[in-house]
Image (cartoon, helix red, strand yellow):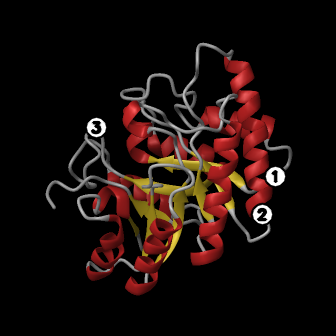
Amino acid sequence: MTYAANLSTMYGYLPLTGRAAAASADGYMRVESWWDFDSATPPQQELDGFAESLEWAGVELIALNSHGGDRAAGERGLASLPDREEEFAASIAAIAAMAQRVGVKKFNVAAGNLDQRFSREEQLSVAGRRYRYAADLVAGFGGTILIEPLSVAGNPDYPFRNGYDIAEFIDREAEGRTNIGLLFDTFHLTNNGVDLNATWQTLLPYTKHLQLADAPGRGAPGTGSIDFPGFLAAVESSDYQGEISLEYLPATD
């Protein structure tokens, strides 16, 4: 197995434009990144700087988050928020533009927290419509939209927890689109009490991307409670064809 490095977690202590070179120096030729800009429409100079840093380092960007709102204030995406239509559309346009520049084809689009002003059903219906819109927009260049479960701890209002809820959502809302899939994250799922091995086998038909970090502390594999040798053996023996990324927080810089 070969692994991609998440620039935002593993190299988050560096300026955005210095992370790809650091990953390359450590031997990673494939990387992924959060949307580490302040808005869905940052200045073009910032976008160019990030793209140029990838090109200069000679690494391939395999996955990119869309703008998730004000993360520092606890926001976790825009897809289900009825009153953020224009901002969501701008966020998808931005990742599509980045795809045209650097070739990235997988996009982690967070659902957004449940808002007491709206019913859960209303928000999930909005999310379904927006995920279909995003999937159609990126389909032309072979893009895939990813939906990720998040830990209850730290994300109490997020609607997706165990992967099965995302599978049910995809079955109900994707309307036959095959480029909407599950992002299987070992840290978030384990924190929510999910049996990784059993869940992996059941949810494999939905899984388009895999991220590794230990739990409960989101450290490197081997620093927490997850049996990574056993889990990775299950992954290797399965029919999984997607990429595997390391999205852990290093103990030191």
Q: Secondary structure at mark 2?
A: helix
- Mark nearer the N terminus (1 vs 2): 2
User: Where does residue 32 sit, x and y in percent of width and height?
Assistant: 46, 64
Q: Secondary structure at mark 1?
A: loop
Determine the image quadrant of residue 27.
Answer: bottom left
Label 3 to label 2, Cα distance in Å? 36 Å
- Mark nearer the N terminus (1 vs 3): 1
Foreground residue, 50 or 210?
A: 50
| In the displayed structure image, the side of residue 239 where residue 250 appears, left or right | left
Q: Secondary structure at mark 3?
A: loop
Mark 1 vs mark 2: in front: 2
Label 3: few (<14), some or many (≥20) within 10 Å?
some
Mark 1 vs mark 3: in front: 1
User: Where does residue 80 sit, x and y in percent of width and height?
Assistant: 66, 32
* Residue drawn at point x = 27 percent, y = 75 percent: 22
Mark 2, residue position? 139
- Mark nearer the N terminus (3 vs 2): 2
User: Where does residue 105 sit, x and y in percent of width and height?
Assistant: 63, 67
Give the amino acid type for the residue marked by disc 2 in the picture. Answer: Ala
Q: Quarter holding the C terminus?
A: bottom left
Residue 21: numbered disc = none
Mark 1, residue position? 177
Label 2: few (<14), some or many (≥20) within 10 Å?
some
Determine the image quadrant of residue 6.
Answer: bottom left
| Label 1 close to label 2 by CB (< 8 Å) | yes
Give the amino acid type for the residue marked by disc 1 in the picture. Answer: Arg
